[in-house]
Amino acid sequence: MRCAIVAVLAMASVAASPRGDAPDEESRKLQGTWILVAEEVAGKTSPAEEVEGVSRTVRGDRVVRKAVATTSKAILRLDPTTEPKRYDAEIIEGPARGRVIHGIYRFEGDRLKTCADTTGLSRPKTFATTHKDHYSLQVWRRKD
């Protein structure tokens, strides 16, 4: 379920920003379908069978995450004015419905790296996980 909660995150935006068009520009970068290529949770690499077949599609400020057995939906708000860039995701459908997840993100070529607290209680400061936290670090590749 941790993968399901966090995998919905970090892919769209309509949040207001002090930098004017920054959220719109970031949102454009996120549009389309992304494939999960790697994940680490609490310092442990997720098995290939948990990563394989996971995708997310971004349309506007809505994200639909699909895995073999679950589908989740979220509304996301980005803050690209911080370093690292931040996002908040309100889960509106799926196992974590009603939860707000706080995370960070960055683009690396055609890849997107996200890191979030699977409990929704805090926000990571770096793109790393340890056995002492509940963070999920994910790497996504653009499909289209």
Image (cartoon, rainbow, N blue to C red):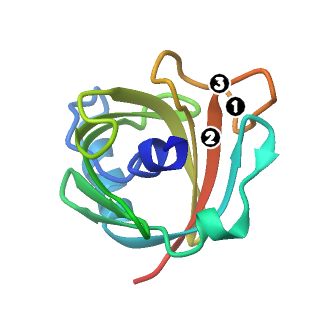
Residue at x 37%, y 53% (from the top left corner): 11
Neighbourhood count class around disc 1 (C-alpha, 10 Å): few under 14, some 14–19, many 20 upward: some
Residue 37 visible to an observer of this rendering: no
Using the image as rendered, state which of residue 79 and residue 48 is in the foreground: 48
Query: Total label count?
Result: 3
Q: Most extreme residue toward the top, as rendered?
A: 121
Residue at x 70%, y 31% (from the top left corner): 126
Q: Which residue is mark 3?
A: 125
Neighbourhood count class around disc 3 (C-alpha, 10 Å): few under 14, some 14–19, many 20 upward: some
Query: Mark 2 or mark 1: which is in front?
Result: 2
Q: CA distance from mark 3 to mark 1?
A: 4 Å
Question: Three-letter amino acid code at disc 3?
Answer: Lys
In what element is the residue under mark 1?
A: loop
86 relative position to 57: left or right? right
Q: Most extreme residue toward the bottom, as rendered?
A: 144
Question: Three-letter amino acid code at disc 2?
Answer: Ser
In what element is the residue under mark 2?
A: strand
Mark 2 and mark 1 lie on one chain; the one further toward the N terminus is: 1
Instruction: Estimate the x, y position of residue 143 in percent, counting from the top left.
Output: 45, 81
Q: Which residue is mark 2?
A: 136
Quarter-wise, where is residue 42 in the image? top right
The mark found on residue 126 in the picture is 1
Residue at x 25%, y 35% (from the top left corner): 97
Neighbourhood count class around disc 2 (C-alpha, 10 Å): few under 14, some 14–19, many 20 upward: many
In what element is the residue under mark 3?
A: loop
Does the residue at mark 3 contact the one at mark 1 (Cβ under 8 Å)? yes
